[in-house]
Amino acid sequence: MSADGNAAKLTRMHRPQRVHYHQGERSRLCTSATAELFDENSPRIRRDIIRIIAQYLDSQGYTSTKVTLYDEANVKQQRENNFISDVVRLRAAILDGEWAEADRICSSAYLKDKKHILYKVYKQQYLELIEDNESQKAFATLNKHLKPLESQQSLQGEFRDLCYLLTTKSIQDAPAFRNWDGVASSREKLAEYLQNILEFEIVGRESEDQHLRPNRLVALLRQAVAYQIESCQYHSEAIPLVPTLLSDYAPVVVPNAEKRSFAGHLGNVKCTAYVGRHGRYVASGSSDNTVRIWDTETAECAAVLRGHTSRIWDICVDSAGSTLISASGDSTVKIWDIRDLNKPQCTATVTAAEGSSGDVYSVSLNPLESHVIMAGYDRTIRLYDRVTGRVVQTFHGHELSVAQAVPNPLGNLIISGSKDQTIRFWDIMSGTCVKSLRSHLGEVTSVATSDSGMLLLSSSKDNSNRLWDLRSLKRLRRYKGHQNTSKNFIRSSFVGDSLVVGGSEDGMVYIWDRESTKIVQRLVGHRGIVYDARWNPKQGILCSASDDWTLKTWWFDSSRPDAILHQ
């Protein structure tokens, strides 16, 4: 059976029909094992990769690029051939005790960077000089050659014992060299070490004689995608069509059941954000002036961040899950180090500029995570440099308070939504407004960009969420059915490439099909306004924040009659 056939067979064999399951320990074992499947630095593997890439380039008609690739590879191969030649000559010189020749070979362009080899060679030379009572020459070798290579020592304290040998009567007097058994034996051991290096390099050439199967790159990619699909938590009856190879496959599911409820806040929960890409933890900001971090599996509170003196309007977390940033009604933004959840620390407090006051409603990070974007009641957007610890740009122009401000995926623009019913686009370098959209009939309560960077989603108190094309700035879709008219920040966001999710004043979480605008799910469980809802593709769960003082996660329960996967 062909490689493509094996990939398809693997996918079919391991896909139960409409079954939800968690791989758990098995997935972790598979993930850890993949790092040991092959050595990416092996010369043989490197050559295999080059041959596969060249085959693909040739099949696509990129013949000139293929020739260039092989030209560059041959230059590198010539260097490897010279390296092998030098190691062969070095091995012979050591066995014969020709140390002048060994010194000359070690200074060649192909060996001078191989510090592990040089250290062993000069150590052998040094020990022989000690054995021959050539103390002055031994001291010179120690200072000139071995001292710069001290980091290559085989055992802790070995270099110290090499220095100690200058004062001993016998090499065996130093602890690291008690097993020294003479010049001849140690030369043979060093020669054997060099022989192993030669065999490792030469064996790597054997793959060049192997037949390269047709379309090998595509076959390997299909196998990789089949493995990703098989390892997913969620499976559907139909074989999915993977739209991109730039990220791991993750099916979009429509949550249909409550998974966990997180209780502990003493006020309504305004916002939520996952901690890190994997989302093992989720954070929430509340009107009780605290941020809490929760374990998504156990629903236990792992940390409470205290320091704000008013409600928390918005939070964001960096991609590594090490830093959390909170925006508050006390006119400040706080930056927290959350690497140790037992001892979270506030590392910086950013106060509104002199003469400005009022709630900070929004906080986000630019794509490089080097700057914090903050906006709020005073109608101003500010760009804070995390390195210098100061505001480096301000953006003025909104007529009323700014509900949310986020960067575009390229990081050259900031997009903001305001109570003045406009969406504005700001040039991050000049601070000027380059475009303004006025289509909503109510206050704009949130803005969000898609992962592709092509789409913008906005929410408004006109009871609608709207989809925009960021390239043409044309309105594409309108999502209705929820309630958003009162004095609340109801926010919406994307779920993968095909769904839109948002909160509502009727206490439900609404999920729409992005293209048809139809409501595909209403999640019932909260007893108050749902302010915010966020999707995590790694965990396959949706998290919502509510006026009922709770945070809830939602997932796909295959046992329910309405269980569907959204393809």
Image (cartoon, rainbow, N blue to C red):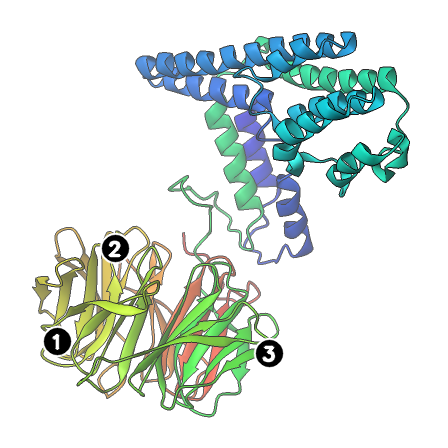
Residue type at numbered disc 1: Gln
Q: Mark 2 points at which residue?
A: 411
Q: In this orientation, does residue 479 appear?
A: no
Residue type at numbered disc 3: Glu
Lateral position of residue 162 relative to residue 394, left or right: right
Q: In this orientation, does residue 275 appear?
A: yes
Q: Which image quadrant for residue 184?
A: top right
Mark 3 burial class by Cα count in 10 Å: few <14, some 14-19, many 20+ = some
Label located before the other in sequence (2 or 3): 3
Q: Where is residue 264 in the image (x, y as percent from the top left)?
A: 53, 87
Relative to the observer, which residue lies in front, 487 or 75?
Answer: 75
Q: Distance between the residues labelled 1 and 2?
A: 24 Å
Q: Position of residue 132 (x, y in %)?
A: 83, 19
Please report the residue visible at 66 percent of the width from the left and 30 percent of the height from the top.
146
User: Height in image: 223 above or below 272?
Assistant: above
- Identify the mark at residue 421; answer none if there is no mark: 1
Relative to the observer, which residue lies in front, 238 or 528?
Answer: 528
Q: Distance between the residues labelled 1 and 3?
A: 39 Å
Q: Distance between the residues labelled 2 and 3?
A: 36 Å
Q: Mark 3 points at which residue?
A: 300
